[in-house]
Image (cartoon, helix red, strand yellow):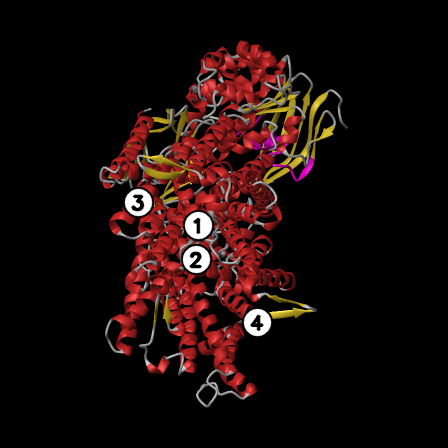
Amino acid sequence: MIETILEARRLRKQFGGLVAVDDVSLKVARGSVHSIIGPNGAGKTTFFNLLTGLYKPTNGQVFYKGQDITHAPLYRRAHLGIGRSFQITNIFPNLTVLENVRLAAQAMSNINFRLWRRAESYTDFTHRALEVLELVGLRDMAALPANILPHGGKRKLELAILLAPDPEVLLLDEPTAGMASEQVPELMATIASIRQRGGKTIVLVEHNMNVVMSASDVITVMNLGKLLAEGTPAEISANKTVQSVYLGELYNVEG
Amino acid sequence: MTDRNNVLEVQAIHTFIGQFHILEGVSVAVPKGSITVLLGRNGAGKTTTLRSIMGLTPPSQGSILLDGQSLVGRRPYTIAQMGVGYVPEHRAIFKELSVRENLVIAQRQRGDLERRTEFIFELFPDLERFYHLPGGNLSGGQQQMLAIARALVPDNRLLLIDEPSEGLAPVIIEHLIAAIRKLAAQATVLLVEQNFRVASLLADRYVIIDDGQSVATGAMQDLRHDEALVHKYLGVA
Amino acid sequence: MTRTRNTYLLIVGLTAALLVFSFLTSAGDLGSFGTTVLSGLFLGALYFLVASGLSIVFGLMDILNFAQGAYFMIGAYVTFALFHSNMFQGIDANLRFPLGVIVATGVGALFGVILERVLLRPLYARPVFQLVLTFGVAIVFGEALKAIWGTEAYSWNPNTSFGIHQSQFEIFGRQFGTYRLVVIAVGALLIVLIGLLLQRTRIGIIIRAGVEDSEMVSALGINVRAVFTMVFTLGCAVAAFGGAIAAPFLGANLGMGNAFLLPGIAVVVLGGLGSYTGTAIGSFLVGLAVAVVAKFSAEFLNQTVWSSMTPMLLLILILLLRPSGLFGKESR
Amino acid sequence: MKAVKTQPLWRRTLQSNIGYLAVVFFLVIFPHLVGWMTGDSPFGVNGRPRGQSVFWQSVFIEVFILTILAMSYNLIFGFTGVISFGHALFFGLGGYIMGLALERSGLGAEAALLLGAVIGVVVCGVLGFLMGLVSLRLRGVYFAIFTLAIAEMVAIYIGRWPVTNAEDGFPLANMPELINPTRNRLTYYYLALLLVIITFLFIRRLMNSPTGKVLLAIRENENRAQAIGYNTLTYKLLAIALAGMIAAGAGMLHVILNRKVGPEILSVTYTVDPLLMTIIGGVGTFSGPIIGAAGLHLSERIFNREFVIGTTSVNIGENWSLILGIIFVVVVLVFPQGIVGTWTRWRSRRGTARAPAPTVRAANAGD
């Protein structure tokens, strides 16, 4: 029996007259890597933001471990164990790399209103931060201001911030966006190592098909706001309908 | 280097957005009277290429020539005035303005709109019906038509069209394809399109962009038979 | 659609409530009621002249110009000084005043260009500093006026003034200055003129399009920055014009800036970001509210403090109750 | 680096604060220094009560008051990234509450002082909290408007309030002899200096605490701070309440020094001054507000007189606010980082050019 950790039930999101997400249901199994793909304008980013709580759905619900979290604000979701990354690099630019990650590690603790002790004296969080930086390969740059990192470094930092509080579900929004191609394998290796350590569920919105096909257990394909297909990577790449939305019908008719 | 037959010649441009190195050497040549399509996966840099030509995200390196005149360093409005029409992604029409006002604003000279009204209504009859309604009341497909029509109001030598078929139902796409083909008789078109079928029905030439670089170019006909290339850069698997 | 209808119902309701309240508190004295309403319209006209620029600039450029009140004040000072200056006493008063207004409007426009081109343009990437800068510029203007004309509050003497300013008319047995009626008319005229400019002219279409998406406007071949400069300048000029035509009634003093900036902001927030209709209607609602409260507090509370506080109170209430304004779009 | 680590804590603390300690040392001996140089007693009792030393003490007490005010403004604007245009409200209310406690409570001076301090700080803290609660959900600009409107409204009301003699205000006569600035100005000087030091240490400790780091995170990127699990509204409320309390303290020091309470302490000047001082000194730095406050207030004192150039005499001081405003506009345009920020940048640019990668120490700091 596969245990569902995150579930979307008949989610719908309307912006004015535009229905961006139309009645999409989805179950994410604990411990799996679940990717959401689709052509531009398919509504996958909107759907993703409904899961993360950035948008409130027009209709439908989101469940986490059976608990209705549809209306839980961003920070509540983080406390429940759902972490998200951002498509655009979204860090604290003028703080050091270490401080960026330490803040994330500290977020779940009960020390946030201790005004009197130095933040550095809570060594657990510093250790945790350094551990995560080690994992993503940024340990040597811990003391640099985050904004002087190169782009690839910022993407890694983004991931480190996400991992630091040790969330159970990781929602990754196009982690390879804007990455130079030679940096992608490194990122994939990191995702693989997160998987290997176990206990984590990953939901991925991604365009890079190499990443999606090699990393995912389950792939959900969206088109025009609707759910089009769901299956293993092999099933999806063999699926005629999916091929046609990606390439257009003509190619398959002729080829 | 420059080919007199090319309306647009983009050579090895590099573009940064903030610290993102988005384009790392993109070259595109658009022959006069052709429809050229930029292909590539999401995030490859197709939209940024159009925006760089338009001057909205100016390139830091490389050259862009419009009929031999350099566009690099010019502001977007000057580039537009030189005869470049731009149809951005997501149909950036002015929703509070009426259809007519959306077209009026695109005039570069008095009388532009009068001269073109007939042609535009012939291409997109819906626009005539909703001429005085706010653009925001139009359907997605009609908004896309309006966005294209807006680029047709002045005399443009080059049209840049970003993802015309995005998020549209198949019937409407058919209509758009027909309209854009009619257009090509009047102007040169550089198109970004994700849908391979739409692209192959429309375009004469293609340029594939992958990871911020242009990696292949040629006649669209040849690409249709090059399954390996298509799957490598565009396919699902 | 229903939202629009509700908005209009709300406006009618608010206006009616203000009028009824004013009527009841004037205890059947129609003259008192009439002058209160006219005072409200007079203030509304002036608020509109401050708020229209604020609102369009805020919508188009995303700058809330805290110096707008200072431009109003500059208009008042320049007109006052020119009219009373010994140098120009040879010119007939009926001519001297409009000339003063024209010069004052021009001075406002000039400082408007300078503020936008020299000071704000380099800061487009840093909106926080733009806000802080307009706040600082407001202080500089205030201090500059103080350095030139001192802290004295100047008031205009009707006995040595121009024709209309000296005449009065009767409304239900009460005297009311004809000149204030002229100000109301001028305000109404400008509402129509600016409205026509926005609706009918090419530049108006460009401005409305720019409020939605200024990048796209530039991609259509329009020099948006030049439009920014023009609109900003126009906004400052209209505010200075407001101060200029207010001067015969209000005189010139250093408190004017804030006394008109805050109601102006209240109008912008009440009307809804970027909505011209909202600004026009909001101006008269706020003007009426201020006049009614002023009357009430003067007669019943026996102090004027409440009337001075009304604009701020309104602003606070609007921010708390309806931050999206009457015609504003609801944000996500 | 190893050597640094093995030194005892007190020595490290001393070394890293050597600049601040020097300033404190100078300020402690300053009244005596002036007294020694001019022959006036710093105590101001022996025959010449209005001597140079006593005069400069009052100038510096004003500097201390403005420093505290600027530091409190920097806490919300510089460290948390929230713009308020109504900071004068807290300064003025603090002053009024202290004044009322001293003059109207009927208590003895010491008890009234204590009562006023406690009530003033609590009221301003609660007020800041409430203002934040109702308005911080609004966009940044709207919060600025909201604070400006509240501050203006209170200023107008109190300016006409008969209970506090409306625009005239009321004098303060009842105050503890020990800190009475007329007779014991030197003790008042040291009290104000002490409060500056306490405020400085408090803010520095706060900003180095876990809470302070969250405030910085909010300034840097509020959305991300929420996404990693912080309820950012709570932290912003805390910052605004604390800043309000500190500003109230500055207002209290101000009215006692001037022995008078009047509506001018609620005027927009006390919003503009800390804003200018913070920006000119350096937004979001520890020493910026101090340098800004001292620099601006001292130069006002120095230039506030007639300058005779040839046959014309110019009084710069009379138009000081105008000059200040112009300086401010120029600073915002040219050095948005302020004095301290620009200096640090300049130094770090030179520093990184000379010494590569000063990174390992901080990375290991937690080990």
Say which amino acid is labelled 2.
Val
Q: Chain of mark 3?
A: C
Q: Nearer the viewer, mark 2 or mark 1?
A: 1
Region rendered in magenta: B39-62
Q: Foreground mark, 3 or 1?
A: 3
A237 relative to C107, above or below? above
Pair 3/4: label in front: 3
Question: Quick one: quadrant of the N terminus of chain A?
Answer: top left
As drawn, is A199 to the left or to the right of B12? left
Q: Residue at x 56, y 52 (%)?
A: A148
SS for callout 4: helix
The local secondary structure at tag 1 comes to helix
Residue C258: image tag: 1
Amino acid type of the residue tagged 4 in the rendering: Ile
Which is more toward the observer, D10 or B197?
D10
Where residue B122 sits in the image (x, y, percent)? 54, 9
